[in-house]
Image (cartoon, rainbow, N blue to C red):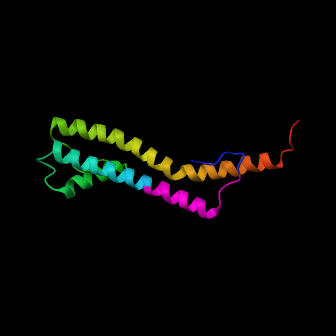
Amino acid sequence: MYEHRSQPPITRTAFIFRMLRHFVVALAFVGISLGVGMLGYLHFEPSQMTTWHDAFLNASMLLGGMGPVHTPKTEGGKIFAGLYALYAGLAFLVAAGLLFAPLFHRLLHRFHWEQTVSRPPSD
């Protein structure tokens, strides 16, 4: 997926397309995570989450790291909310990794590539 350190860094245009691909994957991952959270809240808290709007609000607040707006009332809802909160913390790290991986790779690649280019060949 990425170029080897012995290869030159990709062009700026190719890097922008790489960043765009990573952004789309991260956006899809967050969207699917949000959909699963909404469905879980609608299933496990039917009395409290009567609309998609309420389920969206709770799932997005947990996924964003703010915490739930409505406290779950049922046992299933409490267990789901706890597990979804744990998942949301990991999902945030995965999304951040997807977004920053190309930047870090390019930065490190430039440093290593300059070292391999400027280093005299060994016998």
Identify the residue at horizontal 37%, vertical 48% (top origin). 65
Q: Is residue 12 magenta?
A: yes
> Which one is nearer the viewer's eye here, 23 or 52?
23
Identify the residue at horizontal 49%, vertical 54% (top origin). 22
Q: Position of residue 30 (x, y in %)?
A: 37, 51
> Which one is nearer the viewer's eye here, 82 or 19?
19
Mostly what secondary structure, the magenta segment? helix
Q: Position of residue 8 (x, y in %)?
A: 71, 53
> Which one is nearer the viewer's eye here, 33 or 83?
33
Residue farthest to the bottom, as pictured: 13
Query: Can residue 66 be seen here?
Result: no
Q: Where is residue 118 in the image (x, y as percent from the top left)?
A: 83, 49
Q: Start and end of the magenta stretch?
A: 8-24
Q: Where is residue 15 in the image (x, y as percent from the top left)?
A: 59, 59
> Which one is nearer the viewer's eye here, 101 or 79?
101
Residue farthest to the right, as pictured: 123
